Image (cartoon, rainbow, N blue to C red):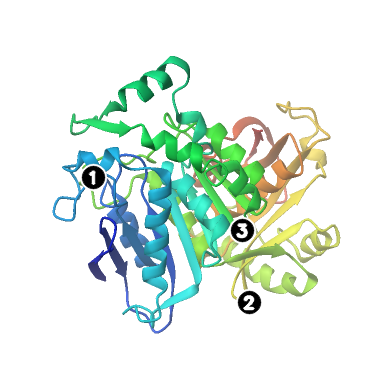
Amino acid sequence: MIKQSHIIERMDDKSILLDITYVEKNKKLPVVVFCHGYKGYKDWGSWNLMAETLANNELFVLKFNLSHNGGTIENPIDFPDLEAFGENNFSKELQDLDDVLTWITDKFNKYSSIINQDNLCLVGHSRGGGIVTIKASEDRRVAKLITLAGVSDFKARFPQGEQLAYWKQEGVAYIENSRTKQQMPHYYQFYEDFVANEERLTISRAAKELDIPHLIVHGTKDETVTFLEAERLHEWSKQSELLAIEDANHTFGASHPWDSNQLPEDLKIATEEIINFVQQKEIIKATNNDVDELLTVTQACAKHMIENGIYQWNELYPSKEAFENDVDLHQLWVIKDGKRVIGSIVITEVEDEEYHDIEWLTESGNTVYIHRLSIHPSYQGQGLAQRLMSFAESYAKQKKYNSVRLDAFSQNKRNNTFYQKRGYQQLGDIYFPKQSEHPFHCYELVF
């Protein structure tokens, strides 16, 4: 693995410190540019470990410090330059990001021969999520966008009334850094810059203008940026997917310093989703041409489960007839690695007879059901099942359904935990005698 640091020297502004992480391959690598959030920096917590994980999965990762985040080139962590922090504003952060993109996409850059500039993805955390959303809406160099616990509104975060008047009168307001205990200044110019550039800095406008794939990752227990903001972004951004990580907080379980060599579980889920999203494993509606290849996937899954003592699928299920019927009803979706089918999911309005006696959380008639979720064993552990479920849930929300329902084999503990982690509530049991004598637990996720 190659890790290198660079400094972008600028004639009329502060320099930008960045680092790159990648593993050399015999092909050009997709580019991930990571933008930190408020009172943040590129080396906070487990961001470096996240970058290493991405690099190990054939991504070229660039992280940078915003020029006015309070750090310096010599000391980028402990905020020695509070004057610069006070002079920061959203316009400067957007200019920083623009200069970083110009640097990495320059044809004379030393990395130009190993990166795929046509697959450049911006990733922003918290306030950085707002910055990358605005930038992605106005810059054609950006092919994809990912927001991690991203904000949906800058204006709402400014004080109002007497507090705003006092800030204007004093010219400065202070906020304590909980880690360093420094009193960090915000000069009133921060608000003046926003007012002068409010149209550009309105995140809802930017999100509505996005015409690129957008992955929204957010914890349901985010104590800093509520999950409602993720739902707003998802509503505005036409090509967005929303991944809700159940019970995850604002930093996805990370803290500073992070001494473990393992990602926190919630950030691991987010990182796996980033990998799949950037690597372009495509989810498309299946055709009859996909059925035979899909059967090899489900047969491999059945064999894998049996080897692990889970007798859920067999030679009778899933069947070719079931998949052909799914295709005819336009309810079967497959995920592909290039041209190879590697997984599937059925999203249907049809309620199977076995479900009729279950006491569901919502009235039947405006819900979707998930069936035959599969990922080939050689692709498992990469977050692809998470992505298929995020796709299905986003599909249901966009179509204005009230909930998603499914069943999980009671003896498959991993699958049950998977759905519970996504916020599904366990209800009654049903039986499929041709598959197993053991029950299947029914679950529902209500929007």
Q: Counting residues from the N terminus, which is met first, the one under dot 2 or under dot 1? A: 1
The quarter in which the C terminus is drawn is top right
In three-dimensional space, the C-alpha distance between marks 3 and 1, rounded to whole angstroms, equals 34 Å
Q: Residue 374: tell me if it is visible.
A: yes
Decide which of 391, 365 is in the foreground and name it.
Answer: 391
Decide which of 168, 27 is in the foreground and name it.
Answer: 168
In three-dimensional space, the C-alpha distance between marks 2 and 1, rounded to whole angstroms, equals 39 Å
User: Residue 59 at x, y = what percent?
Assistant: 40, 68
Dot 3: within a 10 Å radius of its alpha carbon, few (fewer than 14), some, or many (20 or more) residues?
Answer: many
Q: Is residue 306 left or right of residue 3?
A: right
Dot 2: within a 10 Å radius of its alpha carbon, few (fewer than 14), some, or many (20 or more) residues?
Answer: few
Query: Looking at this rendering, what residue extends furthest in the top direction?
Result: 162
Q: Is residue 427 above or below residue 267?
A: above
User: Residue 402 at x, y = what percent?
Assistant: 73, 34
SS class, disc 3: strand
Q: Is residue 363 above or below residue 267?
A: above
SS class, disc 2: loop
Q: Residue 268: tell me if it is visible.
A: no
User: Residue 210 at x, y = what percent?
Assistant: 62, 54
Disc 1 residue type (three-letter): Trp
In three-dimensional space, the C-alpha distance between marks 2 and 3, rounded to whole angstroms, equals 17 Å
Q: Counting residues from the N terminus, which is met first, the one under dot 3 or under dot 1? A: 1
The residue labelled by disc 1 is 258
Disc 2 residue type (three-letter): Lys
Labelled disc at residue 374:
3
Decide which of 37, 166 is in the foreground and name it.
Answer: 166
Q: Are marks 2 and 1 in contact (CB under 8 Å)?
A: no
Looking at the rendering, which quadrant does residue 95 occupy?
Answer: bottom left
Q: Is residue 220 left or right of residue 76?
A: right
**In front: mark 2 or mark 1?**
1
Decide which of 380, 271 is in the foreground and name it.
Answer: 271
Labelled disc at residue 339:
2
